[in-house]
Image (cartoon, grey):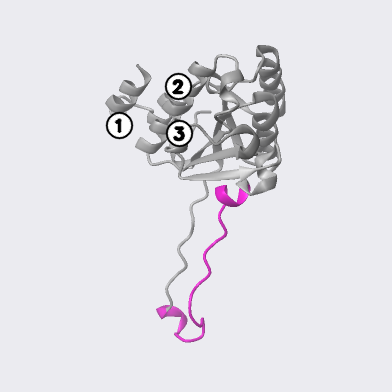
Amino acid sequence: MLIDVDDTQLVLVDYQTKLMPHIFEAEQVLANAVRLAKIAKLLQLPVFGTEHNPNGLGVKVDAVRSLCAKTLVKHSFNACEDGLLEGLRPAPRAQGGNARSLPKHLQKAIPQTTERNAIVIAGCEAHVCLLQTALGLLEHEFEVWVVTDACSSRTERNRDAAFDRLAGAGAELVTTEMVAFEWLRTSDHEAFKDVLGLIK
C-alpha cells in the first residue's frame, strides 16, 4: 500500500531549540524534517507542528516552525490528548441562518470537509512524544506512517526501540524519500523537479 497524497496530513513533533542539541544525529534528522515540510507545502498538504512544554524545551526551531500552518503547544506526551485530533479532524461547519427561512431546494448545502486519514509523522523524542502521539493516532483509527530518518532520541537505542514498538502496533516505517516519491507517484508530476531538488 502506498501513501495517498490526497489523504495525507503531515505532523512534526517537538523539534525544539533546547532539545535538538542533545538528539542523536540531530542535524540529519532536522534536515529531513524540513525537506518533508517543504515537499508537503509544494503539494499543498496540511502541515501541523507540536511543541512540548516550550518554557522548558524552547520553541520549535525556526526552520520547522515557519513551515507549519499550525503549532500546538502541549504538556501531554501524546499530542492527541492536548488537541491534535481537533486540528486533524475539524468539526463540520454549522449552517448559518435559520434553516426554515428558505425552502429546502433553495438552501445552500454545507460544504463537506474532506477528511485526510493518513498521517505522516516525524519528530523527537522518538521513544516518548513521537511514540505516544503515533500510538494515539492509531488508536483513533488513522493510518500512521513514521518517517524514520526524520525521527530520533537522545540515544540510538531508545530511537530503535520506538521504531520496533511502532511497527508492532501497526504503524508503517518509511523514509523521507519514500514519502516524497509515493506522494508524487510519477516523474510527470508538475512538482517532480522541485521535489527532486529538495531531496538532492
In the image, farthest residue toward the bottom: 101
| Residue depicted at x 70% and y 33% | 132
- The amino acid on which the numbered mark 2 sits, given as a three-letter code, is Ala
Q: Is the residue 11 above or below the residue 148 in the image?
A: below
Q: Estimate the spatial distance between the alpha carbons at disc 3 and disc 1, rounded to whole Å.
A: 25 Å
Q: Disc 1 or 2, which lies upstream in sequence?
A: 2
**Residue 195 placement: quadrant:** top left
Coordinates of residue 100 in the picture (x, y in percent): 51, 85
**Residue 50 placement: quadrant:** top right
- The amino acid on which the numbered mark 3 sits, given as a three-letter code, is Asp
**Most foreground residue, 15 or 180:** 15
Q: Is the residue 116 above or below the residue 2 in the image?
A: below
Q: Is residue 93 magenta?
A: yes
Q: Estimate the spatial distance between the alpha carbons at disc 3 and disc 2, rounded to whole Å.
A: 12 Å
| In-image side of 33 versus 156 (left or right) | left
**Where does label 1 land, which residue?**
191
**Where does label 2 land, which residue?**
31
Q: Disc 3 or 1, which lies upstream in sequence?
A: 3
Whether label 3 touches label 1, CB < 8 Å: no
**In this view, the mark in front (1 or 2):** 2
Coordinates of residue 67 in the picture (x, y in percent): 42, 37
Coordinates of residue 119 in the picture (x, y in percent): 55, 37
Q: Is residue 165 magenta?
A: no
Coordinates of residue 139 in the picture (x, y in percent): 71, 40
The label number, if any, that marks residue 92 in the structure image: none
- Helix, strand or loop status at disc 1: loop
The label number, if any, that marks residue 62 in the structure image: 3
Q: Which residues are magenta?
A: 85-106
Q: Residues within 10 Å of mark 2 (few under 14, many from 20)?
A: some
Q: Estimate the spatial distance between the alpha carbons at disc 1 and disc 2, rounded to whole Å.
A: 20 Å
| Residue depicted at x 64% and y 28% | 171
Q: Residues within 10 Å of mark 3 (few under 14, many from 20)?
A: few
